[in-house]
Amino acid sequence: MTHRGNTAGIHDALVGLADELRRRNDLAADQLADVPRLIVAMDSANGMMTDADVVNWLTAPDDHES
């Protein structure tokens, strides 16, 4: 579990999440059975990002990698 309280921290967490999702996409179906589920919870993201921003960021091409 992690908590990020500023935009830079949220960015770093989302970059890490995107990396993990790419890694999981490369796994064979039988390998996914033992992979723990990921849960992302956002609370009070008011001035930082909208839900649509997060979806757009996660589904965009890899031009946002650090």
Image (cartoon, rainbow, N blue to C red):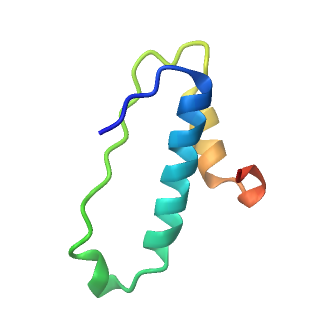
**Residue at (38%, 29%) from the top-left corner?**
3
Q: Which one is in front, 59 or 20? A: 20
**Residue at (48%, 71%) from the top-left corner?**
23
Give the quarter of the image for residue 11.
top right
| Residue 55, above or below 26 | above
Q: Measured from the top left, where is residue 37 in percent x and y?
A: 27, 57
Give the quarter of the image for residue 51.
top right
Q: Measured from the top left, where is residue 38 in percent x and y?
A: 32, 52
| Residue 15, above or below 45 | below
Q: Residue furthest right?
A: 63
**Residue at (61%, 20%) from the top-left corner?**
48
Could you tell whether 48 is left or right of 28 in the image? right
Q: Where's the N terminus, which quadrant?
A: top left
Could you tell whether 35 is left or right of 14 in the image? left
Could you tell whether 45 is left or right of 61 in the image? left
Q: Residue furthest left?
A: 34
Q: How many marks?
A: 0
Q: Which one is in front, 2 or 64? A: 2
- Residue 49 visible to an observer of this rendering: no
| Residue 3, above or below 35 | above
Q: Measured from the top left, where is residue 30 in percent x and y?
A: 27, 86
Q: Measured from the top left, where is residue 40 in percent x and y?
A: 37, 40
- Residue 23 visible to an observer of this rendering: yes
**Residue at (58%, 48%) from the top-left corner?**
15
